[in-house]
Amino acid sequence: MMILFFMAYFHLLAAPVTEPLVMPQTWVDRQVVFEPAFFYLYASLWVYVSLVPALMPDRATLVRYGLAIGALCLAGLAVFLAFPTSIERDPTLWAGEPAFAWLAAVDSSGNAFPSLHVATALFSAFWMDRLIRAIGMPDWWRVVSALWALGIVYSTLAIAQHVFLDVVGGVILALAFVWLSANRLSAAGMTVARDESSRDRLTVSPQSSPKVDR
């Protein structure tokens, strides 16, 4: 799915159907300080989004999740096709930063709105939270997951890869697909392994039942 997505993404990036609209900066953008170190948090998205399918307890739930996040990406690509956008970045910001040279080579300033980096991070965060609760992981993992996702969202601004309006678009896209898929991707499937484990712990055979002296 990622390979197919990137084939379409880079095609639209290289050949937009119309002249891209430059997304305007807002007051929020002017308050965000450029922080090159956030590049690594930005790049960690691909690890983060891979954790959700890796933790899925069964194939059926995995397929439903895959269809949901695939539909989210298709919606983003549809916007890029119908409404090409870009950002105007200060060229001196990325000068002298080796990591940014790689990013500039593979991902220019186009396909800006909505930010699919933001949308996929937040969509994954929602399902990661459900998974953590369903499989009985400690609650502090929910905090780690939430902070990681929010850090990815902020990194898009901190490295000047997106502007605030792109982030808003990504948040709206994520919320829309969380709402659309929440009922379809039931938590019931994700609790099967936990429930079976609980039953195994609670079931005691007659032969192994302890004898109690009266």
Image: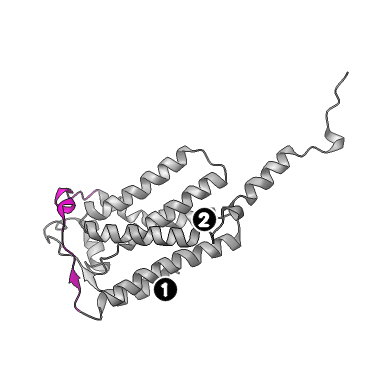
Q: Earlier in the sequence, mark 2 or mark 1?
A: 1
Left/right of residue 104 with respect to residue 170 in the rendered view: left
The span from disc 2 to disc 1 (Cα, nearest Å) is 20 Å
Looking at the rendered structure, the secondary structure element under dot 2 is helix
- Neighbours of disc 1 within 10 Å: few (<14), some (14-19), many (20+): few
Q: Residue at x 18, y 49 (%)?
A: 32
Question: Does residue 165 appear anywhere in the picture?
Answer: yes
- Neighbours of disc 2 within 10 Å: few (<14), some (14-19), many (20+): few
Looking at the rendered structure, the secondary structure element under dot 1 is helix
Q: Which residues are magenta?
A: 19-37
| In the image, residue 168 lies in the stretch drawn in magenta | no
Residue situated in front as seen by the camera: 90 or 63: 63
Q: Residue at x 64, y 49 (%)?
A: 193
Residue situated in front as seen by the camera: 13 or 191: 191
Q: Which residue type does callout 1 highlight?
A: Leu
With respect to residue 56, does 85 lie above or below? below
Residue 207: horizontal and vertical position, in percent? 87, 36
Residue 22: horizontal and vertical position, in percent? 17, 68
Residue situated in front as seen by the camera: 100 or 184: 184
With respect to residue 208, does 79 lie above or below? below
Residue highlighted by disc 2: 54
Main secondary structure of the magenta stretch? loop
Q: Which mark is residue 4?
A: 1
* Quadrant in the picture for the C terminus: top right
Residue 91: horizontal and vertical position, in percent? 12, 61
Left/right of residue 188 with respect to residue 173 in the rendered view: right
Residue 89: horizontal and vertical position, in percent? 15, 62
